[in-house]
């Protein structure tokens, strides 16, 4: 009996190990060891299992990097680094005027902060913040896979005119349910490209054409480009919540964004002029969800998802003009000049903020702001 | 100053030693290199080579070495990798060392050397070659301006180097969209600037609050600061400015039926000429129009724009053959106000019944005799 019991245990243990191995193998499917040719870092986002996605506009490619940073941390410790630009510049052996911060991303597993910085000559570098320490992330001889963005029409291959390739700058990236989402800005036409790419990468990527219906005015529609976005659940359904260069907050049902489809999003809020949205995140407090949006020339906005849900119902018909100017209610937080923002854990977020004294500080905001 | 240049593999080694103290002189058994050298790759200082003779060998050699930027205030070790090789310890910095900056090499707390990364004297100043649109009359809802530089420029700083002046007096704020990352071509020589679309679009809140960025029948001057630097660190040779006047809003899509095509003669390489009757978007013109022969094969050639982007000349690589040709035009081709072939920049839904379905490509046919 003991033998049978032992055999059963062995089989079970084997099955568990096998399951664990195959699970980890599937996430890294198609990965090779080597040095990815990253020419620029436009956007960072994390997937599962410590996989970091790097959006490279210059090579029109998304790289998936195995950071091996997989130690799980439930509650993140607050991070605060004053004058982070000075510290990063010193760590890179250069002057603060010679660097710019490109993006921040938090590994949802380890809660470690990854930060992309660029020298004035365009050299990108990836850093990790560990407490007060700044370390460089090795991108040589790492496990990685990559996916070229299909933004060049196929017939270009036949064209011998040597035309310059169209540039589709990656404006933001996100990861949800095994898919990498990439929004793009074109240097040429005023248009919106939004791609959904299955991960592990296959040859397939879906590109939907998006259009905004300015419900608030019931009149105009445009192809304005997405600046930043998040994937959120609203009334039990997943939505792309996109913020635009011209009119900030627009909703698209995620299941409608399929290749070749033309989807009309609905504007739920316009949040001011002369402004470009920078980052959107979703946080929770006491069973409620909040959307936070950092802006180039406005404070950080906070929107309760409840009010988006409520507004959603009324958008099927054009709204009254008096209501239209308000859209969804939002609160301006007393936090200005935020350059980058990301979710640290469910109730904390990190901000890269230019203070009034000129310092660039990285700090953690808690649920007091929610 | 000692100067030594030699090549190790693909990396060239150059020694620039300002001062150093031989704390451990003579410790190394084979003292072939006695000074700290700069390692170069692609004209960039990628690290330093430190001869064993300068450091006392121990188990933790690497942990005792530190390279720091010489600057006022606190100095910290530069990020990078150390590798112990036969003759030297190689330090490869996380990013290349900056030209014109000085660095110190420390062994524990003692200074081994101070090294300056020399400025590249061969680097020339960049120039602004062209501002598009080239014409000096634009619609008040102009959407894009392109700046074409002679060299790759520092990205991410355009807003601080560009000023728009109205009637030579008032500086306008918030005219251009502050986009990060900015929209540069891959070579970082052409920047696309967008006039704030939220202010151009009718009835959006930015448009209602602030009005359009430009108003008809006014004069505007675009100033480019000479402080804008190339990626090589050189500032623009001279300040640059361009004045233009505005006309009424353009809400009409370009109509290809109105274009005037002047066909060349067969058995020549004379350019095909297409007159648009209005200036179109410089950047899109460079890729949106192609030419196919009767067998639907694309014709190779070069294009040139003239008449302030109002005319395109296509010169074939081979002699024209007599026959029927088709111009294949991308539906995304825009005029200066962002109205493309399919639709105006913003479309009034009330007029929807008048709109045709969007087409990816438009065609126009002609014969060469």
Image: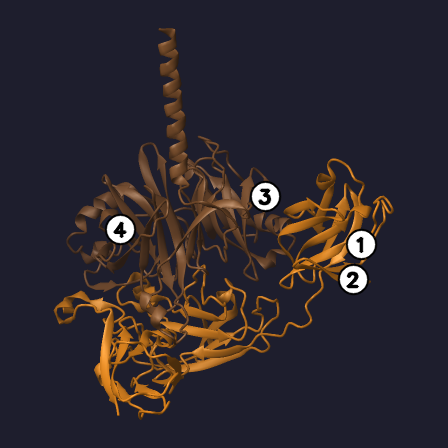
Chain colours: A brown, B orange
Circles 1 and 2 on the same chain: yes
Front tag of 2 and 4:
2
State which quadrant residue B1 falls in: bottom right
Front tag of 2 and 3:
2
Disc 4 designates what residue? A251
Under circle 3, the secondary element is strand
State which quadrant residue B340 falls in: bottom left
Counting residues from the N terminus, which is met first, the one under dot 1 or under dot 2? 2
Circles 3 and 1 on the same chain: no
Viewer-closest of A20 and B71:
A20
Front tag of 4 and 1:
1
Disc 3 designates what residue? A135
Quadrant containing the C terminus of chain B is bottom left
Circles 3 and 4 on the same chain: yes
Q: What is the chain letter for disc 1?
A: B
Position above or below: A10 against A119: above
Q: How many angstroms separate mark 1 from mark 2 (CA)? A: 9 Å
Disc 2 + disc 3, Cβ < 8 Å:
no
Q: Can you tell which mark lies on residue B35?
A: 1
Within 10 angstroms of label 1, few (less than 14), some, or many (20 or more) residues? many
Q: Position of residue B300 (x, y in %)?
A: 36, 79
Q: How many angstroms separate mark 4 from mark 1 (CA)? A: 63 Å
Query: In this rendering, would B61 be left or right of A172?
Result: right
Under circle 1, the secondary element is loop
Disc 2 designates what residue? B4
């Amino acid at each position: 009996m003991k033998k049978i019991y032992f055999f059963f245990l062995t089989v079970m243990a084997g099955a568990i190990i096998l399951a664990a191995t195959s699970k980890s193998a599937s996430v890294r499917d198609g990965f090779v060891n080597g040095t990815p040719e990253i020419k620029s870092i436009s956007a960072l986002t994390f997937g599962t299992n410590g996989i970091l996605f790097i959006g490279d506009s210059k090579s029109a490619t998304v790289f998936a990097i195995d950071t091996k940073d997989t130690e799980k941390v439930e509650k993140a410790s607050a991070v605060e680094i004053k004058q982070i630009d000075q510290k990063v510049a010193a760590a890179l052996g250069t002057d603060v005027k010679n660097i710019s911060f490109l993006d921040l991303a938090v590994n949802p597993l380890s809660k470690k902060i990854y930060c992309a910085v660029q020298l004035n000559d365009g050299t990108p570098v990836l850093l990790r913040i560990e407490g007060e320490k700044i370390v460089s992330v090795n991108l040589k001889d790492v496990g990685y896979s990559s996916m070229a963005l299909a933004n060049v029409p196929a017939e270009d291959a036949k064209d011998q005119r040597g035309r310059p390739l169209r540039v589709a700058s990656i404006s933001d990236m996100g990861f949800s349910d095994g898919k990498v989402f990439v929004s793009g800005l074109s240097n040429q036409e005023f248009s919106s490209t939004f791609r959904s790419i299955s991960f592990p990468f296959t040859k397939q990527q879906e590109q939907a054409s998006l259009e905004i219906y300015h419900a608030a005015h019931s009149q105009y529609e445009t192809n304005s480009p997405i600046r930043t976005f998040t994937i959120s659940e609203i009334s039990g359904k997943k939505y792309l919540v996109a913020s635009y260069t011209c009119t900030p907050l627009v909703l698209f049902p995620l299941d409608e964004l399929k290749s070749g489809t033309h989807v009309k999003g609905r504007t739920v809020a316009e949040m001011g002029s002369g402004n470009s949205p920078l980052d959107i995140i979703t946080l929770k407090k006491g069973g409620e969800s909040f959307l936070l949006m950092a802006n180039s020339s406005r404070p950080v906005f906070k929107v309760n998802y409840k009010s988006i849900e409520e507004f959603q119902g009324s958008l099927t018909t054009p709204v009254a003009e008096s209501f239209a100017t308000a859209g969804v209610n939002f609160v301006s937080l007393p936090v200005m000049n935020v350059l980058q923002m990301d979710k640290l854990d469910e109730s904390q977020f990190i901000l890269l903020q230019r203070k009034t004294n000129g310092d660039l500080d990285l700090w953690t905001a808690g649920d007091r702001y929610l | 100053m000692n100067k030594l240049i030699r090549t190790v593999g693909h990396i060239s080694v150059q020694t620039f030693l300002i001062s150093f103290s031989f704390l451990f002189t003579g410790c190394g058994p084979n003292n072939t290199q006695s000074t700290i050298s700069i390692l170069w790759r692609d004209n960039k200082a990628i690290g330093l080579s430190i001869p064993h003779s300068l450091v006392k060998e121990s188990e933790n050699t690497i942990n005792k070495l530190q390279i720091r930027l010489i600057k006022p205030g606190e100095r910290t070790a530069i990020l990078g990798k150390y590798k112990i090789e036969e003759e030297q310890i190689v330090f490869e910095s996380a990013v290349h060392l900056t030209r014109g900056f000085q660095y110190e090499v420390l062994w524990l707390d003692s200074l081994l050397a101070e090294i300056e990364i020399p400025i590249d004297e061969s680097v020339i100043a960049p120039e602004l070659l062209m501002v598009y649109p080239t014409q000096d009359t634009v619609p008040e809802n102009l959407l894009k301006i392109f700046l074409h530089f002679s060299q790759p420029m520092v990205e991410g700083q355009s807003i601080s180097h560009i000023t728009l002046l109205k009637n030579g007096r008032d500086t306008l704020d918030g005219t251009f969209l502050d986009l990060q990352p900015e929209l540069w071509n891959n070579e970082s020589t052409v920047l696309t600037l967008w006039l704030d679309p939220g202010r151009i679009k009718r009835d959006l809140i930015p448009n209602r609050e602030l009005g359009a960025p430009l108003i008809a029948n006014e004069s505007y001057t675009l100033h480019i600061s000479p402080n804008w630097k190339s990626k090589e660190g050189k500032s623009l040779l001279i300040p640059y400015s361009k004045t233009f006047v505005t006309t009424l809003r353009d809400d009409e899509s370009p109509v290809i039926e109105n274009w005037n095509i002047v066909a060349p003669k067969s058995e020549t390489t004379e350019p095909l000429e297409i007159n648009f009757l209005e200036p179109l978007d410089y950047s899109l013109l460079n890729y949106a129009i192609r030419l196919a022969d009767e067998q639907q094969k694309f014709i190779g050639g070069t294009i040139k724009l003239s008449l302030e982007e109002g005319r395109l000349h296509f010169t074939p690589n081979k002699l024209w053959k007599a026959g029927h040709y088709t111009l294949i035009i991308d539906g995304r081709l825009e005029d200066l106000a962002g109205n493309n072939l399919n639709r105006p920049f913003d479309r009034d839904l009330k007029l929807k019944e008048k709109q045709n379905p969007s087409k990816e490509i438009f065609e126009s046919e002609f014969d060469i005799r």
